[in-house]
Image: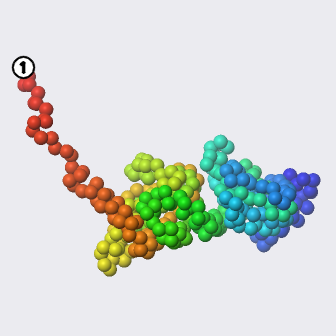
Amino acid sequence: VGGGGMGEEEVMERLKRVHLFSKGDVDESCMALFARAIRFRTFKAGSLVTRVGDVGDKMFFICKGVCNAAREGEVLERLEEGQCFGEVSLMRMCHRIRQGMGRAQAVENLERIADVEAATDCELFELKAEDAVGLMKKAPRLSFMLERLAEVRKEHQQQVMASKGGAGLEAKLRLVEPFSLCSPEGLTTLCGAMSVKLGEMGETIVRAKSPANGVWFVAKGRCVRMRGGSEAEVIGEGQCYGTTKAASVVNLVLTENGVPLAEAALRHKWEEDFVATSDCEVYLLSTHSLLEVAKGEDAMLKAMRAMVHEAAALLSPRHSSPRRLSPSRLSPPPPPPS
């Protein structure tokens, strides 16, 4: 046991303070395996446990003290005794190791998205991904519980980031058309209504033939448009996907009286998959919020309609038909064989 001089029994007693083990869902033999895999760590108040950009190859369990998860100086979450953190990235790494990836591949694009600082003197247990893989083979019940823990944490992270990330996103969206033409009030409304998705490398964010539900803004990471199994376009940080499609939905609702938003979205389905090629943070500006804001934003609405007309022109038969050369520009026929 990496318990800093503690025996297994003492580690087991401290583990009972952790929510994962406090409800009696894990038997003593499983806890004993866990106790042998973890390492005991202490952190003074004000010290960083993890930093933004660190490799997410371990998770932590708080058995004493309080930590704060923060990003860009803003506290996102207070973490107290019994809670854990880092499980989302740890489980991603475990999946990669079990797929046969070496460490170099398994840690690729697996970076922390928040700083975690000890708000008080803290006692933590640390579990590394390589040890977690072996542990989960021996204790399938623990594997299931860690998987579920990571799913719940990811959902919670998305909710917290959506509620806290508005100000930073406004500045980024201000650089992207048509949102650059939106008033400060309209942009604040849009950002306040956004939802966030933490995509994993290889995950399909949007599937072809599903209703167009809004504009996807890539805040971190990298995604691609996939068409016919091939990459059609890379969408990197600070770029949007689906702007023209969402504009078409909004325009249809505003120009054809009585067309419900859901029906308009069905008429303008996604034409390709939108796939994360790294772990990423993407925000959805829904067609519903775009519609409500566009009604009072003439300049933005005008730009959105221009996008729709331009896209329609590109798809028109006149534009897509091959250019015909005049007779004077046709090449002369080859001479007959002698």
Q: Amino acid at mark 1?
A: Ser
In this picture, residue 224 sits left or right of residue 11: left
Colouring scheme applied when the structure was drawn: rainbow
**Numbered disc total:** 1
Task: Identify residue for label 1.
Answer: 338
- Pinpoint residue 27: horizontal percent, then vertical percent: 80, 66
Q: Which one is in front, 46 or 96?
A: 46
In this picture, residue 111 sits left or right of residue 195: right
Q: Which one is in front, 178 or 15?
A: 178
User: Can residue 157 be seen in the rendering of this structure?
Assistant: yes
Quarter placement of the C terminus: top left
* Residue located at (88% from left, 54% from top): 3
Query: In what element is the residue under mark 1?
Result: loop
Occupied quadrant, residue 9? bottom right
Most distant residue in the bottom direction:
258
Most distant residue in the top direction:
338
In this picture, residue 280 sits left or right of residue 294: right
- Pinpoint residue 142: horizontal percent, then vertical percent: 73, 62
* Residue located at (47% from left, 68% from top): 183
User: Can residue 266 be seen in the rendering of this structure?
Assistant: no
* Residue located at (38% from left, 70% from top): 298
Occupied quadrant, residue 73? bottom right
* Residue located at (81% from left, 56% from top): 47
Mark 1 is surrounded, within 10 Å at the Cα level, by few (under 14), some (14 to 19) or many (20 or more) other residues, namely few
- Pinpoint residue 28: horizontal percent, then vertical percent: 83, 65
- Pinpoint residue 98: horizontal percent, then vertical percent: 64, 50
